[in-house]
Amino acid sequence: MFVTHLTLSDFRNYTSLDVELVPGPNLFVGSNGQGKTNLVESLGYLSTLGSHRVSSDQAMIRQGQDTAIIRARLAHDGRELLAEVELNRSSPNRAQVNRSPIKTRELPRYFSSVLFAPEDLALVRGEPSGRRRFMDELLVLRAPRMSGVIADYERVLRQRNTLLKSARASGVKESQLGTLEIWDDRLVGLGTELIRARAQLVSELAPEVTRAYGAIAGADHAATLSSQLSILSSNPDSEENEATATVHDVPSVDRVTTDFRNSLARLRRAELDRGVTLAGPHRDDLVLGLNGMPARGYASHGESWSFALALKLASAAVLRRESSSGDPVLVLDDVFAELDESRRSRLGAAVADFEQVLITAAVFDDVPAELATHVVRIRAGEVVDE
């Protein structure tokens, strides 16, 4: 799948934008602060219904306006469709496909993209919550029904935490323990499904990450992935037993269910004392390894940057393998300025076979020549030269 035309109205700093895109590489060039990232952010929103930069949709509506519109014409296998979304300050967002209204949450079914941005460095150097979010967003892209599983798990977790806080404040009553067991059952059921889905995802991502990192950094570097499960830890707040809590396979339903129940029983007293759920997928982590060492804390800036990029390239590889509508659109936002010349060249070769790649850069010469075949120059929210 690729985008043939993008139209923006009152999105970020764009009053109005119409730009033609082509299959293969598309390079957006302009000084910092001119709107290059805003442009690719709009396509990321069509794919995920979210921004990699802000949590509120309203931040993407141009100042002083009540509505912003993103409209993209998509092509695959000789067919075209028009996907559009309207962001509103004071009313629900609206979406259309081929001018027919659809539920906004259905929009990602029609368009898939994978975006890498400087903020993704936090996947390697940041907190576990960012890596959990990365996995869950990819799960939903692969299987939209997982959005409901994740939302249900988070709802049950909130209810269980509320009960634990109430028990801590008032003293534990027998009736509260009975109610807690009911929430335990729901937490274990939903949590087991989420843990296994993430483990399956990691098992598919791992070889792709190894391949992508080697393609970017060279074959003498080994990148690995594994899952760290809090239900296997005797003390989820401690890092001393990371090895025993790390798994490299996809555990069975029975195994996860048993381990989860045993963990809740083992931690019951601590949970009642603290008023919070101490084990479950909300406290798990994705372990990134580089040459036998944890990437977090040991990887250099360049290695961290390459690892984060490898995670996104691996995501695109997994999605393209399962898609019936072609490759996801690959978006590389301000990547090449952070790479040395050899890694720029290797990255250019690694993305060359994707159906469409969108690239932003402040300096034209930072981008390998083979990726600069279709250039769009951006200045102050306008296309100034194509």
Image: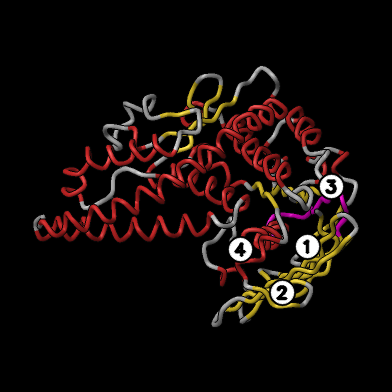
Tell me the kind of residue under disc 4: Leu
Task: Tell me the mark number nearer the camera, choosing from 2 and 1.
Answer: 2
> Which numbered disc, 3 or 2, marks the residue closer to the eye?
2
Residue in the image at 56% along x and 51% along y: 137
**Residue 161: mark in rendering:** none
Q: Earlier in the sequence, mark 4 or mark 1?
A: 4
Cα separation between marks 3 and 4: 24 Å
User: Which type of secondary structure does the marked residue at label 3 adopt?
Assistant: strand
In this view, 197 is above or below 223: below
Distance, label 2 to label 1, CA atoms, is: 30 Å
**Sequence order check, earlier mark of 3 and 2:** 3
Res. 25 mark: 3
Disc 3 marks a residue whose amino acid type is Pro
Range of residues picked out in magenta = 21-34
Instruction: Return the residue at label 1.
Output: 379
Tell me if mark 4 has few (under 14), some (14-19) or many (20+) residues whose alpha carbon lies within 10 angstroms of its own: some
In the rendered image, residue 33 lying in the magenta stretch gets the answer yes
- Front-lying residue, 270 or 173: 173
Q: Residue furthest front?
A: 254
Name the disc covering residue 49, or none: 4
Q: CA distance from mark 3 to mark 1?
A: 20 Å
